[in-house]
Image (spheres, rainbow, N blue to C red):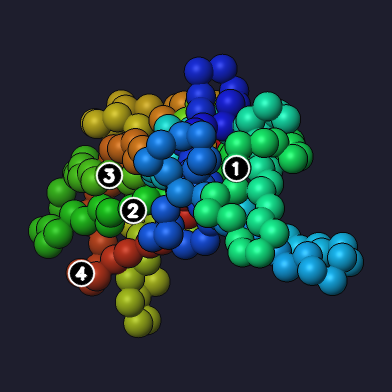
Amino acid sequence: MSFAGPPASTLPYELYQGTVSGGAWGSQFQSGTTYPVVQLNLLNLTPVTGSLTVYAQMTLPQIAAAPGNYQDIYTSGMTTVTLNTGLLAPPTSCGTGVAANFPFTVSAVVSKQCNVSYANNVSFGPQSAMQSNLASNNTIGIACTNGTLYTVGLTPSNGNTGGTGALKGTGANTDQVPYQLRQAAGTSGAVWGNTAQNMPSSTGNGSTQQFPVYVTIPSTNYTPDDYADTVTITVTY
């Protein structure tokens, strides 16, 4: 069974009588399936009421599901209650006469969602002084629901939306090493910031999509030290 949702998108699922190990909810009119049987004692001639819980579970990972509303409608002709009686002992089957129908709808909502799957650090390693135009790179991974348009912004700890940051030293060292975040390699690569004009966009497919991050440093003419900075990733969808 499956929910019908946005065009060309479905959500497979099964209905169960209890836990998944108990088997799917079937029908006596469909061979090889199981269905609940309820025995009622009507000797006191008073009405008997009760309920049965229907359990549902997705049968497959739904990574390719598009955001939207999904539903599967069970009409009267698709649901039946059959009834059989015995005078001195319970009957051996529920019979085939349809006593009632109970139409219902199974529904689900898939919301737009994006997650940062991973963010690998960018390292320049040990460098000697008086160098220029250093470059390094690594990758980040973004996973968004299928068909979801999103953008990825990068902001250094100084809040610069143009992707220009500063590596800070340790202890009393006040030197700061300027760097530039980029979408492409080299000192002429497009800058990567956090505005509509300088950040990449993509459309999710339910799986992790990889983005290379390039960083350039104009000069290493600073006090010897370990320098670092923290960059914030902002995914907008």
Residue under label 2, please give it.
119
Percent position of residue 189, x then y:
32, 27
Pointer 4 and pointer 3: residues touching (CB < 8 Å)? no
**Residue 207 visible here:** yes
Q: Position of residue 108 (x, y in %)?
A: 63, 41
Direction from residue 96 to residue 128 in the image, left or right:
left
Residue at image x 76%, y 39%? 100
Instruction: Label 4, secondary structure: give it.
Output: loop
Figure quadrant of residue 81: top right
> Which residue is denoted by mark 3 in the rendering?
139
Residue 121 x, y percent position in the rendering: 28, 56
Q: CA distance from mark 1 to mark 2?
A: 62 Å
Upstream in the sequence, badge 1 or badge 3?
1
Dot 2 crowding, Cα within 10 Å, few <14, some 14–19, many 20+: some
Relative to the observer, which residue lies in front, 84 or 183?
84
Tag 1–tag 2 contact (CB < 8 Å): no
- Sort mark 1 into few (<14), some (14-19) or many (20+) by Cα contacts within 10 Å: few
Q: Position of residue 69 (x, y in %)?
A: 66, 33
What is the distance, in whole Å, between disc 1 and disc 3 at their CAs? Answer: 64 Å
Q: Amino acid at mark 2?
A: Ala
Residue designated by label 4: 224
Q: Residue at x 51, y 34 (%)?
A: 29
